Image: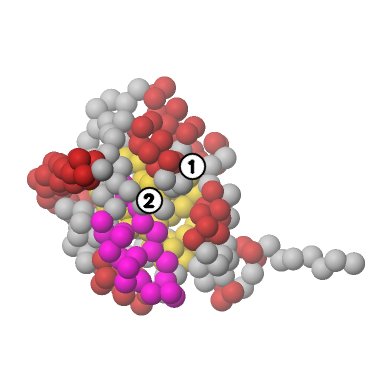
Amino acid sequence: MSRLMTPWHLLPRERTMNFFDFHVHSHFSRDANMIPENLVRVAKKKGLRGVAITDHDTIIGGVKAKKSCGSDFFVVVGAEIRTDVCEIIGLFLTEEVSSTDPFAVIDEIRNQNGITVLPHPFRSFFPPRPQRPQSILRDIFEKIDVIETFNARSSVKANQQAFALASTMGKPMIAGSDAHWYRELGRGKTLVAPFTSEDDLRKNLLTGRTRIEDTRNTFPQSTPFLVLSALYGRIGRFSQKSRVRSRLQRSATKT
């Protein structure tokens, strides 16, 4: 008689300590202050197995952190891309994403064998958005791989709506702190099924072998910081995006 295996999510916590924070920003986001190498050290001290560094419109922070993380810690290189309709996170990126059209962004991420994530889909107060056609949003929701159902900077209601959306559409779920400062790291944790490689981690995310737990909602305490981030980030975002595009143009010229 074959022995039944215990489902991974029912194992004792000490055997599944694969906690990730899948949404953090380094100082390569103009509204954040964390140095990538220091970010990794703080995340380790907080008991995380890994983080996804998802700076605004650039992968530089993730690339730098991955070079210094060591073999006992995972850094997923990502970026949070501001599109014409919403923000989309790309995970496991190897190149910058240059488009601002949401569907083109999804294609660019997929072409890198990356994973597309819809972050804080119901955070209506920040950043400001023009009225978004419901039909376009539905199409984006259909195409996206994973939905962020807990964001530590979002309201309880917004997170509940995100969870309902993912449940209705049968999408895998992850959590993220959306940390811009060290003290925020780990406030949104995702428990991931055991894995041994980055490919295994990618498969676990795509197949929903994750569980949201150990979350700490900081809304509305974080609201003043969001406002300051918006003002600070708005000043630098245009120059940041132009720098990224200039770098892409220079790279294209050399080839």
Q: Is residue 4 above or below residue 85?
A: below
From the top left corner, tell me how far across and down residue 94 is, in percent: 36, 52
- From mark 2 to mark 1, how far is it between C-alphas? 14 Å
Image quadrant of residue 106? top left
Q: Residue at x 57, y 70 (%)?
A: 16
The magenta stretch spans residue 59: no
Q: Residue at x 30, y 42 (%)?
A: 97
Q: Tell me the residue that label 2 is attached to.
A: 93
| Mark found first going from the N terminus, 2 or 1 | 2
Q: Tell me the residue that label 1 is attached to.
A: 145
From the top left corner, tell me how far across and down residue 208 is, in percent: 56, 51
* Residue stretch in magenta: 60-82
Check if mark 2's residue and mark 1's residue have beta carbons within 8 Å.
no
Q: Amino acid at mark 2?
A: Leu
* Secondary structure of the residue carrying numbered label 2: loop
Q: How many marks?
A: 2
